[in-house]
Amino acid sequence: GGDPTEGEAAASDTIVVGSASFPEAQIIAEIYVQALDAEGIKVESKTGSGPRETYIPALTNGELDLVPEYSGNLLSYLDPEATATGPDEIVTALADAAPDGYEVLDPAPAEDKDSLNVTPEFAEANGLTTIADLSKVPGFSLGANPEFAERDYGIPGLESVYGLTGIEFVSIPDGGGPETLQSLLSGDIDVADIYSTTPSIVENDLVTLEDPENLIAAQNIIPLINSDKATDEVKEILNKVSAELTTEDLLDLNAQNQGPDKTAPKDLAKQWLTDKGFL
Amino acid sequence: MRWIGNNTDLILGYLASHVWLSIVPTVLGFLLALPIGWWANRVPAVRGVVLSVGNVLYTIPSLAFILILPGVIGTGFLDPLNIVIALTVYAVAVMARFASDGFASVSPAVLDSARASGFGAAGLALRVELPLAGPVLLAGLRVVSVSTVSLVSVGALAGVDNLGRLFTEGVFTGNTAEILTGIVLVVALALVLDLLLVIAGRALLPWSAGARRVRGGVA
Amino acid sequence: MIEYRSVGKTFSGGNAAVADFDLVIPSHTTTVFVGSSGCGKTTLLRMVNRMVEPTSGQVLIDDVDVASRNPVELRRSIGYVMQASGLLPHRSVLDNVGTVLRLQGVSRAETRRRSLELMETVGLDTALADRYPHQLSGGQQQRVGVARALVTDPNILLMDEPFGAVDPIVRDELQAELLRLQRELGKTIVFVTHDIDEAFLLGDQVVILAKGGQRAQVGTPADILAAPANDFVRSFVGLDKGGRELHVEERDGVQVVVDAQGRATGVLKG
Amino acid sequence: MIEYRSVGKTFSGGNAAVADFDLVIPSHTTTVFVGSSGCGKTTLLRMVNRMVEPTSGQVLIDDVDVASRNPVELRRSIGYVMQASGLLPHRSVLDNVGTVLRLQGVSRAETRRRSLELMETVGLDTALADRYPHQLSGGQQQRVGVARALVTDPNILLMDEPFGAVDPIVRDELQAELLRLQRELGKTIVFVTHDIDEAFLLGDQVVILAKGGQRAQVGTPADILAAPANDFVRSFVGLDKGGRELHVEERDGVQVVVDAQGRATGVLKG
Amino acid sequence: MSVASDSWDWLTDSANWSGDAGIPHRTLEHLQYTGLTIAIAAVIAIPLGLYIGHTGRFRGLAVASTGALRALPTLGVLTLVSLNTGINLTATLVALVLLAIPPLLAGAYAGLESVDPATVDAARAVGMTHWQVLWRVEVPLAFPLLVGGFRSATLQVIATATIAPQVPGPGGLGVYLLGGLAVGDYPRVVGGAVIVIVLALVVDLLFAVVQRLTTRRRVSTPDRV
Ligand SMILES: Nc1ncnc2c1ncn2[C@@H]1O[C@H](COP(=O)(O)OP(=O)(O)OP(=O)(O)O)[C@@H](O)[C@H]1O
Ligand SMILES: Nc1ncnc2c1ncn2[C@@H]1O[C@H](COP(=O)(O)OP(=O)(O)OP(=O)(O)O)[C@@H](O)[C@H]1O
Ligand SMILES: [Mg+2]
Ligand SMILES: [Mg+2]
């Protein structure tokens, strides 16, 4: 439909930065905001813009100009038929799949993807190391965000790629957060979908099941930007940020965000940029 | 509680937009409901329609309403306007019923007497009916304002800044303090607005304190 | 002079409240319509200020058909006191009294002056001026209603059971007050009541109405008591069953007047 | 016999409604409390069935202090007719009349029989039995109230302005009906009104009350008219300002009785 | 409009009408949550409301606390409680019960208050005990307003129970809204909302019938809570 805000947003030279509504995406978006701002580029922060199904349409109709994305999920959203799973393949494919007038910049080495985790006790009791081993467990329950039930990398993939059956799916819409963890530890669920950069995996010695079939695609952090706003200067700044951003950084940032201090995304971004010499 | 100290700017920002997102639909809903309620009180058929449409509107789940609006009326996906429109619709749905009841509560004897004194149609509506419906209108406005304040938080699920953000974000980080802060502030905001309405009512309707007795006496 | 010329009123439901009613109400006197509930008293009264439009016939004031006059102006020019006062609950006493003056565009100051004057005329303490109606007693409210009706100094005053809702003691006072006022002001008053005693007390001319607004008898109170036109009137004024047939008994040297049921009603003098 | 012994009642707000009140109410007669609004009539009446508890003194029925009796049983044993009927709006007329019988455990059939009987006694068409109170006229509701109070055949009947809310014509009827009933039943009736005419009509003994439940005068109607105890009573019964001073005028050969204000009140006979 | 026709397709797709994730099962779940919520809330609110209405005590407190309860954001309560409970209905029920209490409580005490004090006085005067006054006079006369309280509580719960799947465990019709939202399937969101609305209207109609039946032969009582 015709959007009344379209013309207005495009005409302005401010870059509006959005993000998914979970903390890690917000932290990265804040890093973009502050890095650009430090170089005198006009930016506006609208982080926490709902799920991809909200913020990508918001991006393409001009309400947002820039969002941090996860390469694999972005590709499967933009092109549901895509088959690429390797990191480079995906980035190549994304260049084509990006909506008209939008482009992806350099991916960061940092990666955060869905991962299936079980408690050490459960792993030991059932002899689990890979996802395929789950076939030995009759009728297990799996907790994840609601979309996991329908995405290719989710239940459908587990059934078709790994031939698992009888999965009892429990919807826990906190992105592998505290409720998912609590459910797993209390035994309410057997398997938990937790993003790989979530500190609770390490803190609780959870066993992350390997994914030999590469069902879960690579998920490098990658900026998706409105080409009109992607001046060389902007690209350079964002590419520099991406080059510095590692999986360890994400783990560390998330740990501070979810730890006892509950440090806010804004503050974490500032701290990261300072550490890396951007500020 | 350290979390609150570290994040006062964030919280105050959410609070400020929560205030706006609450007040605008409440005021708009009130103003729109007045003529509708007045008309509904005049024409029984209209009253029936207003009440049933109000019922239907009010049962639309708020989340769905806010999310579907952009697709239906072409607003932006992140536009706070979605919340404003959705909550205004709820406000009108509730307020129109109160407005109709309010105008109905005006004693026919008083209206008759005003007509007999020589009030014209407009004078009657604005200078007699409207002020006399005041107490019921105020009661309705109080209900609408409280429920609007509480409903605004649902907008956080659609990516709009307000105190509801403290719930959605608090869940991801297991931050009980954050969620509690949100709840307390929402309730406090609702109570403060309610208090303001009560004070405004006292100032604008000084006669209403014992007016019920008058009607009781006449009936 | 107010004149009803073969006036009829059939309400939308097909209910013929009044049919073919004729009456002349002389100026500067009090005419009382009396009859039991639903006989059409209010309907007849409200035709004078066009709060009810007759479905047939005409009502004339000083030979001008009211139907030819603008209703809003007509109403502003006629005082109307309603049952249970009909005051505006959201306006102070003073504002209630001054309502019509303000509607007529009289200045605020002048309205205030005239309203206070009228409050005094009807025997209301002006200290009550800033109260709201609900802060007054029933009797005080009725006085405000009378003051409001008189404030524009109208020639005609319509009063619809104005004292029906107050207790008998206050009612006695208000009746006495009205008699005093009328001696002073000499308005053309049309008064409605269902209390025959009140009608006899206040009316120069009493119109006894039967169902459907039929004139059962028109005359002065003494005329009616002395020569009731028919059985309906006789029963209505209480002359049947000996209700008004009095005799005298002597008690402790006092001549006590006693009615047919043995009820003491007064003391004979002179 | 009902006896008040230096009874006082101060309400929680500190309002002394009644102070140091003494009275003996003989059995099988009608005693009327009359006084203006707020003088404590209802308060005194409700002490008899413990709807109000005195703060000092005692109320005795046949020499037994009511305070020693169970209030629920006491109330069931005393008939009480309230102002504006006090019927249960969600029960049919028949059920309203039979309420107390059912509370006392009387069978459904027997209750029905006695209730229908009572409806006839008070002059109510039994066809009305299945109606709800709001489907009755004011006068019919009052009759239901009286029937309900009488259904258990109580010795004592308390009536609090039972005819205050009905129009004067119906009121006359109800008063006549009550006189007839009392002639038949001979109950001990305590009746409250603020209408002195009603008091004189119904009361064997009339108690004129001043503010704060003070006895201004106690006596038969004729006694009071013949020898008012003081100015308050004189003014209350209308003997001041010539209100009850009547004289006779001849009109068309009829002796018309006229009061001091020139109001025709009746026709002299015999 | 394509969302409309797609929603219609979703609603009429027989695949959506069977199994545990099917519309009938989700509707049943939704009704279960609603029924359970109303039952719990009623057990708490009705006796309290009757007590307040009958005695007139604690009225100010009741008015103030229902006001505060009405202001409680359901989403916040839901998330707060769910952080401290496992995968079960607890958080949903707590949040919804808190939502349902104010209208039930108000319906009960306002209902009793709407009973003419003269009627209550009359009932006492004919010799009814406190319990008889309450059960034979006050409650029957307050019935329309009591039912009115249930009516608005139930409608609010039906509409609001859609956020139940926001926490782990519960299903109900909210699954269509949240699930649809998660994968950008707007026709499913609209379809789910339509079912909720229809459900609410049907329930509302039932209440209207009950209210009509219980009020019919009585004096008309005011029907506002
Ligand atoms: N607006 C109306 N629509 C239909 N019928 C009406 C209307 N107003 C009055 N009536 C009917 O006309 C008849 C006369 O009514 P009116 O009010 O004049 O009686 P009334 O003598 O003033 O009675 P009351 O003493 O009870 O005031 C009644 O039968 C009444 O029901
Ligand atoms: N429950 C109460 N609490 C406080 N004051 C009361 C109460 N009931 C009555 N009063 C006061 O006691 C006084 C006497 O009241 P009561 O009802 O006995 O008067 P009454 O003579 O019956 O008047 P009315 O003719 O108006 O019925 C009044 O001043 C009244 O305001
Ligand atoms: Mg009338
Ligand atoms: Mg009394």
Image (cartoon, coloured by chain):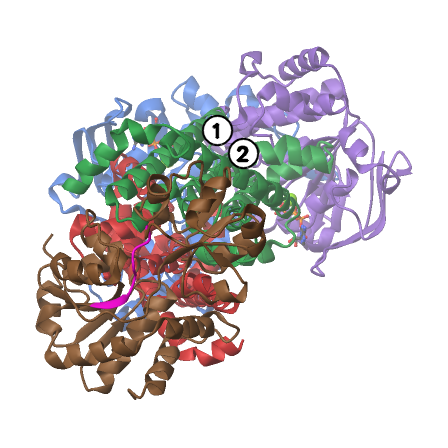
Chain colours: A brown, B red, C blue, D purple, E green
Residue at image coords 65%, 33% = E135
Rendering quarter of residue C119 = bottom left
| SS of the residue under disc 1 | helix
Q: Is the residue A190 above or below the residue C112 in the image? A: above
Give me the chain letter of mark 2. Answer: E
In the depicted view, which residue is nearer to us: B182 or E191? E191
Label placed on residue E143: 2
Mark found first going from the N terminus, 2 or 1:
2
Q: Are marks 2 and 1 in contact (CB under 8 Å)?
A: yes
Mark 2: which secondary structure?
helix
Q: Which residue shows up at 71% across the image and 46% down it?
A: D43
Q: Nearer the viewer, residue A29 or D231?
A: A29
Vertical position of residue C157 compared to residue D63: above or below: below
Q: Please state the chain letter of the residue tagged with numbered disc 1 in the rendered image.
A: E
| Circle on res. A91 | none
User: Which residue position holds label 1?
Assistant: E215
Tell me whether marks 2 and 1 sit on the same chain. yes
> In the orientation shown, which residue stands out farthest toward the right?
D63
The part of the chain drawn in magenta is A215-223
Question: For this view, does E54 lie left or right of residue E153?
Answer: right
Q: Is residue D26 above or below residue B37?
A: above
Crowding around mark 1 (Cα neighbors within 10 Å: few <14, some 14 to 19, many 20+) is some
